[in-house]
Amino acid sequence: MVSLRKRRKTDDAAVEAQKSDADSKTQLIDSISIPTGDPLETVLLTAGGPVEVTGLDIDSDTLAQARDSGVELIVPLIGQGELLGALYLGARLSDQPYSTDDRRLLGSLASQVAPAMKVAQLVQEQQAEAKERERIQQELQVAALIQQTLLPKELPNISGWHVDAFYRPARAVGGDFYDFIDLGEGKLGVVIGDVTDKGVPAALVMATCRSMLRGAALRHDSPSAVLDDVNNNLVPEIPPAMFVTCLYAIIDTEKGDLVFANAGHNLPYVRTADGVLELRATGMPLGLMPDMEYEERTYQLHDGEVMVLTSDGITEAHNVDGEMYGFGRLMGRVAKKTTDDDMVAALVGDLEKWTGSDAEQEDDITLVVVRRTASAEGAAATLSKSAPEQVLTSFTLASEEGNERVAIAKVSEVVGPLGLDPAKFERLKTAVGETVMNAIEHGNENNAEFEVGVVVAATEVTVSVKVTDQGGDKEIPEAEQPDIEAKLAGEQTPRGWGLFLIGQMVDEVRRESENGTQTVELVMNREGDS
Amino acid sequence: MPQDGFEAKVTSTEKGSVVELSGVVNRAAKDGMEEAYRRASETPGEILLDFASVEYINSTGIAVIVGILAMARAENRKVGAVGLTDHYREVFQITRLSDFMHIYEDASSGT
């Protein structure tokens, strides 16, 4: 009977006995566990060879159990000073006692088995660790997908203003976000925020918070009322120990008037002709407690003045000596004028100089820069007509055949109510099915552990479906018109219709490879010929 | 995960055979479709594929249909289709399947 001992992480280890042959004289003994600290463990570790049960005088439940099972000899299997398992032997079939030669042979056998068991245990552990790493990597990819999908695709284009933004996620994606909201009548809502925590939980809270902010911004004219509204809605939804810092400002793009409120976020800086100002307004982060009050302040941005909003990924970045970049350095950098006044490039460049360009980024880095370029008074402040994108749903699917139809059903559920032309709707469904099928079969190579991510979003003019797989940097071939004559003549395989169909079904197909993922975005115009 | 069920029922008519397809036409339908074609081809005349009860056709299903058309072509056999939704009719046009099989408006106009 051979017993294998699971590698001990903390406490008990299990020892299982296995039946070794079909001889009628052999007996099967039940599994025998040796709890950590049992005196038998010490005996086996120090015996230096097989141990006869009869000669042992120790207070051990395990030993008593072994005796009850008819065990006469225990052969410890020891590797690198660790008890890996044991061979439990009952009486010899000849009813003779175990001889010295027997014990020597068994000891020799054990010394050869133990290293092999040790290797097997290490391999098992490494496989488990690799699986865990893979799971974490996938989770990070999902988080990055959610986050990147929700950040604005276009910057506001306003006469007399220059708006710029920069976002770079850390490897363990954080919860930074920013947003621009067209409030009508020449008013622009500007949001910057940071969710505590990282990965998928942060990304989901960020998505929730962003939606709440967009909704509240359209209901209230005052930034403090917006933050108050979002806070009260977020408190019951947010997981414990998570919160969101957020600054919300409304800019009157005709007059340059700025009204803002701050829920515990980094203070905005404004570079003026006389130096750099901090725009202070007090308020607790969102999601901590209900019924908080948010101070509301105003400022008028003059010609040439620049407002800089940042996340703490900048100020808390360290250099090789462990020093933080800090607010003072940031303020100093904001104060400097550059030749082309590209504030984003100047700040990112200075930060990289500080951390070293090869250093791994610790946290997400987000920057929003709003500059009043010329007198906007009297000018027609025209906000970009690019309608904001709204995410309708996002989900993941295992890479299993048939799940493309699950994707079609889920996409249909949210796209159906948009009232798309029926023919377009059907085409989108087919394109989604084919794209998800490609992601399952070609991207993820039918590996059920790899997920396919799907994000459905809509603007006033388009519906888009992004399908992401973990296919690495595999090149997606360009769609070609299949040669049906050659296929019918048996000169070509009948297969190879997927990519062609996808291209024919939607108005635009975009492809993107990034960080080991591939994303195909299907874009369908909501209006136009069916 | 939805079940990819597929069935094909073959009946003989005066003009040939009708293969009533139902469920999902994808690569899993290949054997069933080929078997149905073999049975249908025992009757002389056109083989009409009836898609009225088909829920879903994907690119792998199109490949199966192309395979059937290739078999039919080798045997000089006419194949038609009926019961297609507007969408799949469009798919058959885009893929040019409709250039090689007659698409009927409804079953009565076919075999």
Image (cartoon, rainbow, N blue to C red):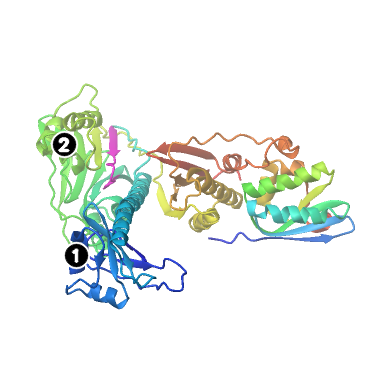
Q: Residue furthest bottom?
A: A68
Quadrant of the image for the N terminus of chain A?
Answer: bottom left
Three-letter amino acid code of the residue under disc 2:
Val
Which chain is indicated by disc 2?
A
Question: For the point 34% across and 47% down, which residue is it?
Answer: A137
Q: Relative to A490, is A239 on the left or the right?
A: left
Q: Secondary structure at mark 1?
A: helix
Residue A478, placed above or below residue A287: above
Main secondary structure found in the magenta portion: strand
Q: Are marks 2 and 1 in contact (CB under 8 Å)?
A: no
Where does residue A453 sit, x and y in percent of width and height? 43, 50
Quadrant of the image for the C terminus of chain A?
Answer: top right
Given this view, does label 2 or label 1 mark the residue nearer the observer? 1
Residue that carries the numbered disc 1 in the rendered image: A43
Q: Residue furthest top?
A: A339
Question: For the point 56% across and 47% down, which residue is it?
Answer: A434
**Alpha-carbon distance for marks 2 and 1?**
74 Å
Which chain is indicated by disc 1?
A
Q: Nearer the viewer, residue A206 or A49?
A: A49
Where does residue A294 sit, x and y in percent of width and height? 16, 55
Residue that carries the numbered disc 2 in the rendered image: A270
Where does residue A339 sit, x and y in percent of width and height? 21, 21
Q: Which residues are magenta?
A: A161-178
Where does residue A332 sit, x and y in percent of width and height? 11, 31
Q: Earlier in the sequence, mark 2 or mark 1?
A: 1
